[in-house]
Amino acid sequence: MNVYSVRHGQSEGNLKGLYQGPDVPLSQKGKEQAKTLAKRLKNIPIDVIYTSPFIRAKETAEIIAKELKLPIEYWESLKERERPTELEGLHIDDPKASEIKEQIAQNWLKGNWKHSDDESFEDLKSRGLKMVKHLLEKHRNQNVLCVSHGTIMKMIVVCSIFGEKLTPEVFWEFNSHTWSQNTGITHLEFIDKYGWGLLTLNDTTHL
């Protein structure tokens, strides 16, 4: 099985440097990025397209699906990590946003700590493990494309590699030191004899 996770194209929120909720659409550049990505994916035999229901991912998936002539399946679990709603609409450099991020950073290693209505590490890990299990149970002999978001894409990677052994420390370091650019492709492969392998991370050579 091959799992290709791609981050959505540039959104209007990305363009403006804002923390964004689920209803932010692609920018014009994001639409062009998605079209370029779709042409590249024509060279890969995709069997199933899953997408996050967030507008920016949905629009990216629709552009890809039109090029590949495949239907889209919406998968709620592919949505981005739930951050405190107080962040939505704030600029990434806003002092209030910086204060919230610092509080999260200071408490992240506790595992179950939440700032408010956000997801804790344990929440996110549970979602990631369930997704990996679903992929193995439903698509073991297929090539799957998942259109998603940066943080949850990274959680899928580390959950496939570490499983239940994944710790807050490991995820924090991985998330902090790897990048997820718009329309970047991350490729995981599962082989029965060897298990999961990470073949590529954030491949943007099509841009």
Image (cartoon, rainbow, N blue to C red):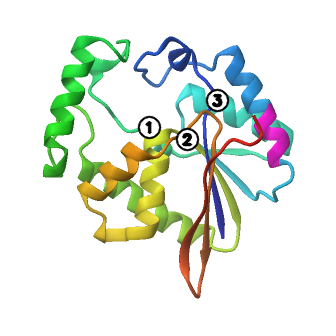
- Which amino acid, mark 3? Gly
Front-most of residues 131 and 72: 131
Q: Quadrant of residue 167?
A: bottom left
Residue at 85%, 39% (x, y): give it.
67
What are the residue bounds of the magenta stretch?
36-41
Q: Quadrant of residue 91?
A: top left
The furthest residue to the bottom: 193
Residue denoted by label 2? 148
Marks 3 and 2 sit apart, C-alpha to C-alpha, by 10 Å
Marks 2 and 1 sit apart, C-alpha to C-alpha, by 7 Å
Residue denoted by label 1? 80
Q: Are marks 3 and 2 in contact (CB under 8 Å)?
A: no
Measuring from the top left, give residue 37's x and y in whole percent. Answer: 76, 38
Secondary structure beneath label 3: loop
- Any magenta on residue 11? no
Front-most of residues 165 and 102: 102
- Which amino acid, mark 2? Ser
Residue denoted by label 3? 9
- Which amino acid, mark 1? Glu
Residue at 59%, 68% (x, y): give it.
138
Q: Is residue 116 visible?
A: no
Circle 2: is it few (<14), some (14-19), or many (20+) Cα within 10 Å? Answer: many
- Looking at the image, is mark 1 or mark 3 nearer the viewer? 3
Q: Quadrant of the N terminus?
A: bottom right
Measuring from the top left, give residue 78's x and y in whole percent. Answer: 49, 45
In primary-sequence order, the first of circles 1 and 3 is 3
In primary-sequence order, the first of circles 2 and 1 is 1
- Any magenta on residue 38? yes
